[in-house]
Image (cartoon, rainbow, N blue to C red):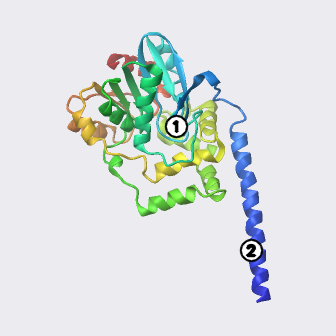
Amino acid sequence: MKKNKHKLLTAGILLSLATGIIYVINRIVFATATLKNLLKSSADNYYEWRFGKIYYRKKGHGTPVLLIHDLNVYSSAYEWNKVIDELAKTRTVYAVDLLGCGRSEKPRITYTNYLYVQLITDFIKNVIGEKTDVVANGYSGSFSVLAGYSDTDYINKLILINPPSLASLNRIPSKRSKLHKFILELPVFGTLIYNIRTCQSNIQLLFTEKYLYNPFSVTPEMIDTYYEASHRSFSSSKFLLSSLVSGYTNNSINHALSEMNQSITVLSCEGEKESEKIAESYITCNPAIETSTLKNAKHLPQLETPEKFVELLNIYL
């Protein structure tokens, strides 16, 4: 009995020590990731939304256009840095950091597709204040479609850049994905898993394999900025990732897409896998949808080929 108690005490001490060490490592990772402060902001650039403060950038004069970055823990309004100035010559440009991303607040909640539908409609109503065009990249195209369907008075044209497949949005959380969410949200150890998944080498791999058509066009600034965006607000950052990997941000848009009367354009990129099939599925839902393909680009044409991207965007806006 004494030996068993001694073993349990030793195991408890070692576990506490390991937990303490991992906690310190996590804090160091988050602190060092934001040292360069590449994502600067000021108090004037925030919209006080009911679920948290939302960072946004505004520039230019003219008909408003709202730029929405891809929905992941790495992205922010930085995604649009190379095109905002050009678009602002003829438009009033708004670029937001979505809730849970970049400089916006990152509450410890379950993030859902409908949460972002509410965010987009509230932002347009309360900040922009008039009907606006929306340009959404990647996964954000899904809730932009639902926002346009639910509120036709405030969303005009929709341009979807490399939107997700309609089939992927129909997947609902499973027991396995819910377990992943639970593990990722664990204090200390879940945070360690998050830090491993969002390390700089993995972000570089994302750019070279998924984000850019030419892997050699990635810059240290891109990697550092995406790394910083995923580590602002410390461990609160992981709650968006846990919702994404578990499927809570999925929501079918087939019905909304088929019923919408607004002008919708699907802008695909040559380097994206199955981009043609995805575009065809959107047209099957709504034959009025226009499509176009951007050459020599992949998931982030606004960063890789900004001049060609703006030129094509202006055709449909």
* Residue displayed at 47% across by 10% down: 61
Label 1, label 2: how many angstroms apart (C-alpha)? 40 Å
The 10 Å Cα crowd at callout 1, few under 14, some 14 to 19, many 20 or more, is many
Against 171, is 82 above or below? above
Q: Which amino acid type is shown beneath numbered disc 1?
A: Leu
Q: Image check: 280 left or right of 8?
A: left
- Quadrant where the image shows the N terminus: bottom right
Q: Residue 99 carries which label?
A: 1
Q: Quadrant of the C terminus?
A: top left
Tell me, yes or no, if residue 52 can be seen here: yes
Judge from the rendering whether residue 134 lies leftward or rightward of residue 306; answer left or right: left
Within 10 Å of disc 2 (Cα), the crowding (few <14, some 14-19, many 20+) is few
Q: Is residue 240 above or below residue 152?
A: below
In the drawing, what numbered circle is on residue 11?
2
Given the current orientation, which residue lies at the most extreme bottom position?
A: 1
Q: Position of residue 94 (x, y in %)?
A: 48, 21
Task: Point out the frontmost of discs 1 and 2.
Answer: 1
Amino acid type, callout 2? Ala
Q: Is 50 left or right of 121, judged from the image as shown?
A: right
Q: Give the mark, 1 or 2, whose residue is nearer the N terminus.
A: 2
Residue 2 disc label? none
Secondary-structure class at tag 2: helix
